[in-house]
Image (spheres, grey):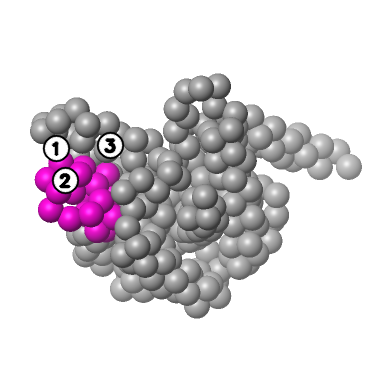
Amino acid sequence: MFLSILYVILSGIALPVGGIQMQYLWRNQLGDVYSLGLGSAACLGAAAATMSGWCSLTVGSFICTLICTAVCFLVTLKVSTRKLITFGILFGTFIGSLGTIVVTNAPSPDLMQKYYLWGAANFRMEGVTGADVAFSLVLFVLGLGAALADSRRLTRHFRGEIELPAMHKALDLLMIMFLVTSAVSICGPIGFISLGVPNLSRTVCRNTDIRIHYLISSAMGIALLLVTYLVTEYVNFGIYLPISATMAIIALPLTALLFVRQHKDAEDQPSR
């Protein structure tokens, strides 16, 4: 129970903070931690580790994510942000296809089920070792520390006051990967929270200082994941409810309400 709550909190911080960093880095509200294929790479590594047994699921997902990040690191040095987004979509599709091939050739149904339960995201911590947790926490500290250290530059970059060099963007991407992998490698790829929550934060607060959005996004992320976790554990109607799907069902009406309210406020403002 304690470990589950720990990773609810960790994921609630890591994924929204990584998401808002991507949006500021690209100056695009569609920036997401999974946009460059990081989620697909984590799934491929987890699938390979699960099916082969050559390492733990956490280490497997980290290794594949690191390889994916290294490729994106090199591409970032050569192309514009717009082209990088296009590359990320195509590259993610390619990595996802490899993952599908690995999973469909699983040696046993039990291994396939184990992978799919991880891929649907959960906080049950089944098969997670102390070494996995320690490794994950190190990645989290490194990623969050880098996010805080680079906050001023990211804010100025987003405002258009400066343009970050390609090498700086590539290093930021590496640190974002550390932050995201700290959660994904243990709990599986959790959708919505890395894209929806940062956008909700920017809807609620117009201030462009990224440090403020770190706080708001983290608070929203933790609250949303905690509610989702409690629902999946205690209000599940006797069926298995994956975290990602349940959270999307809970969060979508709230998201729609906030965006509709924002649109109405924008329409009312000129008439005042």
Element type at marker 2? helix
Do we see residue 221 in this rendering?
yes
198 relative to 106, above or below: below
Q: Nearer the viewer, mark 2 or mark 3?
A: 3
Mark 2 sits on what residue? 48
Question: Which numbered tag is attached to residue 225?
Answer: none
Q: In the rendered structure, does residue 59 fall within the stretch colored magenta?
A: yes
Q: Report the residue marked by disc 1.
A: 102
Q: Amino acid at mark 2?
A: Ala
Q: Secondary structure at mark 1?
A: helix
Closest to the observer, 32 or 119: 119
Q: 10 Å neighbourhood of mark 2: few (<14), some, or many (≥20)?
A: many
Q: Please, what is the dominant secondary structure of the magenta stretch?
A: helix
Q: Amino acid at mark 3?
A: Lys
Q: Which residues are magenta?
A: 42-62
Looking at the image, is mark 2 or mark 3 earlier in the sequence?
A: 2
Helix or strand or loop: what does disc 3 sit on? Answer: helix
Quadrant placement of the C terminus: top right
Q: Is residue 61 magenta?
A: yes
Labelled pair 1, 2 in contact (Cβ < 8 Å)? yes
Answer with left or right where residue 259 lies relative to residue 63.
right
In the picture of the structure, the residue carrying the numbered disc 3 is 114
